[in-house]
Image (tube, grey):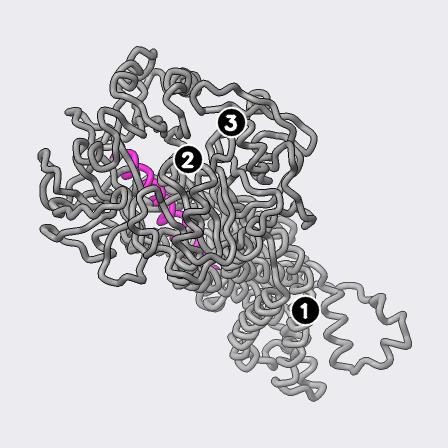
Amino acid sequence: MKKLDVRLLRLIKNSKGQFASITVMIILALTIYVSFSMVGDNLYNSIYYYYDITNFGDVFVEVVKAPKSAIDQLHRIEGIEAAQGRISSDVPLRVEDPDEKVRVRVVSLPKEEKVINDLYMLEGRGLQEDSRATMVLQQFSDARGIQLEDKIIPYIAGREYPLDVVGIVGSPEYIYLMENDQTLLPAEERFGVIYVTEDFAQSALGYQGSYNEVMITIKEEHLHRIDTIVEEIEDHLDRYGVRRTIKRDEQLSHKMMMEEVNQLDMMSTAITLLFLVVSAVIINIMLSRMVKNDRMAIGVMKALGYNNLNILGHYTKFAVVMGLVGSIIGIVLSIPLSQWFTNLYILFFNIPMFQMEVYDIYFVYGILLTTGFCVASGLIGARSVLKILPADAMRPEAPRAGGRIWLEKVKFLWNRITFSWKMVIRNILRNKRRAAFLGLGIALTYGITMVPVFMSSVWSNLFMLQYGEFQTMDYNIDFSHPMNNNGIRELSQVIEVDHIEPKTEIPFELRRGWRKKTVSIIGIPRDTKFYHLKTPSGSSVDIPGEGIILAERLAEILGVGVGDEILIKNFMPNKEDSVIEVKGVAVQYLGTNAYMDIEALNDLLGEKGMVTGALMNSRDEVVSKLRNVGNIRQVQSVEDMKNSFLEFMDLIIYSVGVLMIFGGILGFAIVYNVTIISISERTMEFSSLRVMGFDKKEIYRMISRENGVMTFLGIMLGVPLAYGMCRAMISALSTDLFSIPFIISPRSYIITAIATIVFVVIAQLATLRKIHRLNFMDALKNRIS
């Protein structure tokens, strides 16, 4: 082994604490990068493989009622590969507990040989034209313990239909099972999907020879013009009452899954770069101090014939070894971690053939990325080797010119500071680079720690704002078909209500120039007590007699503001499109809607007194009393959504804990390494203090005070940094499905500060042994060994 390599091993041994802490950061960076990247690719590839084998549709159209002949004629549109009709309706399910509210979506299976959105059989058999049989979606069957040969009883149009369970299936439509975009969280034990024969659905739901949903696949070579094809589809089906057109990119389950893939990619990049950048900065500072301390040794090496390149490579190897060790261990750990994440996704998402593959390319990328950072930081940190001349290195380095710090000029304040505190302040102000790095590191630790603390309250804030301020009804009821105001009076006779209001909810396509978005416009009374619309600045927004209120997210998508006009494309049969003025923009946390006066909306539709549902507050048994009412499509209870949220909190707490650990490791590494570097380069100073009568505890206390001051300053700097990081996180996570409220409570700032201080104290305690093991007498001799 070469002499320089032997010396390298000694350097690693003598600085094993720093070597280990930096290596751990590199291990974390590589583990996260490789595992998240592989899981993201596996998730994406598995989803699309699932789509391929089940023939997942490209366009889905909800209509009032369309005959089979109209659907067959869609094949004439250029680019359409196949079009099939089906029937879908949400109905109550009878369960043993009368207080439990369970709903199922009854979906018919097309008779075609190659079914669009085909099912993946997990257990049992198909329906085989058995009108009293059903297949149940796996998530729902697992959550409720439904097995083959069990009998389930849905209420369809007010009647009970006992159905025999003959199969357990997966569906590409429900990889992520959500009832609608207003539910926020899956509640698999309270909402499921069952599949029945087409004949049974048409008979039970009253759709003889017709359908209320159309599934369409587009030829691959025509996918680039899908928007044009969708317009042709809507024009063709317009007479049958198009309720909503959904492209695959907008389909609820697909959108949630793609959000998950994107978040994995974002996290793998952001966290990896953060840890590698911090590691590189620490390596840079560490090597620059190491070269400075080894000044005489470097002079001797040059005198013995080693050139600048040899010595520069020697110190750079120190960084490269850390990078390689961290990379190898990180890659080894990433494989079981990616498998663990895969199993976690299998628990939450229904992908029957989730494929776990190991992608060697990420090993290569990881090693190259880490090595690149380490080589760059090593070369920059050790570059001062080039300036050291052998003759000059034989003499001790001249002490730096001293001088008063600016605080000493403030006599009134300076004279009241104790001697030990004066030393602390002088050292901080005379070593600005080291102090700045420590302060920025602690600020970064504070910011990273704030993110999970903030995210732990985000969902509860979102839920409370949506259902405690924005909407304040207890129940949201949808009718199976539009009715007049008599439907509201009939509900009041069945249910003991505290307050009830009509609503009209109809999907429209809103356009502004080339921008467009299909959303539901909700018509409510102008004096509504259930909707409390507010502007982004917090001012109240009243429902106007004329005009429309847009959700903030919708206004951003369309690029409009108050006073602008938008085109409303009417999907109702034989109805004209309209131009309407935007009267206000309101914050909406779940979903994306527009709001109008119910009478103005009915005028737009050319109807009078039409309602599609009701909003109510009631202490009565609403769900059980409406279970057998034929014209009720669904009853949403805020209490049920609250219970789903509480179940989701366990996962939130777990995620918060993991991110807190990352923040702790980062904070520990920064404080520990900077403190060790400070101790190493100040050995002579501490030795002099020992001669003057300071004991080791007093020296340690002085270092602790320096770190304490920088911790305080770092936290102060970390507050705006944390604010910016949380706002960036909100921008990245907000989608059309939910707009996350930006609320950071004082409690979050305090908790984050306490956590940051704990991380700093742990790192500080880890350096205590270094102080006790310093040989102050050897330092005073000032000799090279």
The residue located at (80%, 64%) in the rendering is: 401
Please say whether residue 350 is one of the residues in the magenta stretch: no
| Label whose residue precedes the other's in the sequence (3 or 1) | 3
Q: Nearer the viewer, residue 198 or 321?
A: 198
Kind of residue at disc 1: Phe
Viewport quadrant of the C terminus: bottom right
Q: Which element is circle 3 on?
A: helix
For disc 2, the marked residue is 482
Q: Nearer the viewer, residue 404 or 705?
A: 705
Where does residue 562 sit, x and y in percent of width and height?
Answer: 68, 34
Please say whether residue 33 is one of the residues in the magenta stretch: yes
Q: Residues within 10 Å of mark 2 (few under 14, many from 20)?
A: some
Q: Which element is circle 1 on?
A: helix
Kind of residue at disc 3: Leu
Q: Quadrant of residue 777?
A: bottom right
In this view, 274 is above or below 410: above
Q: Which element is circle 2 on?
A: strand
Compared across the picture, whether 41 is left or right of 724 comes to: left
For disc 3, the marked residue is 605
Dot in front, 3 or 1 = 3
Q: Decide: marks 3, 1 in contact (CB < 8 A)?
A: no
- Name the chief secondary structure element in magenta: helix
3D distance between C-alphas at marks 3 and 2: 12 Å
Where does residue 537 sit, x and y in percent of width and height?
Answer: 69, 48
For disc 1, the marked residue is 712
The magenta-colored residue range is 22-49
